Image (cartoon, helix red, strand yellow):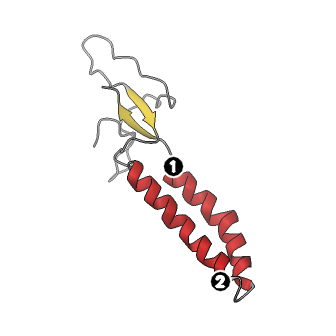
Amino acid sequence: MSADAQWCGQCFAPAASSPAPLAGFRTAPAPAGGPASPLMRTTRWGKTQTTFGPVGRILATIATLLPLAVMTVGGFVDMFAWGGALVYLAVIVPWAMRETWQAGRIPVR
């Protein structure tokens, strides 16, 4: 398991009994004699174990918006494509953008 894991990916057991720190706040070092937890920060532009870096995020955004452009242009041939474009814009795009641009946590250096 990684040092910042909250639960085991195989058995789903909690990794630590203490609650996870809030996003954007630094964790205090452990008392003397105990293991020190690394200071973490959140980032939208840095690559983490669970998120893309800036190039991957921009490419994912373009890949998400490309079908919308195709459906919009296709609406000039078949008007039902505009209905699909509206559903895609209202449901898929916000979900994909939220997942693509979620903040990841990286250790403070």
Q: Quadrant of residue 36?
A: top left
Establish if 56 lies above or below 86.
above
- Secondary structure of the residue carrying tag 1 is loop
- Tag 1 residue: 101
Q: Residues within 10 Å of mark 2 (few under 14, many from 20)?
A: some
Foreground residue, 26 or 77?
77
Could you tell me if residue 46 is visible in this image? yes
- Residue 73 location (% of width, % of height): 65, 79
Q: Which residue type carries mark 2? A: Gly
Q: Which residue type carries mark 1? A: Trp
- Residue 15 location (% of width, % of height): 35, 38
> Which residue is painted at 40% across and 55% down in the image?
56
Foreground residue, 68 or 15?
68
Q: Residues within 10 Å of mark 1 (few under 14, many from 20)?
A: some
Left or right of 89? Residue 18 is: left
- Residue 47 location (% of width, % of height): 36, 45
Could you tell me if residue 51 is visible in this image? no
> Which residue is painted at 53% across and 65% down in the image?
64
- Tag 2 residue: 74
- Secondary structure of the residue carrying tag 2 is helix
- Residue 89 location (% of width, % of height): 67, 66
Left or right of 9? Residue 21 is: right
Q: Quadrant of residue 84?
A: bottom right
> Which residue is painted at 65% across and 83% down in the image?
74
N-terminal-most mark, 1 or 2: 2
The quarter in which the C terminus is drawn is: top left
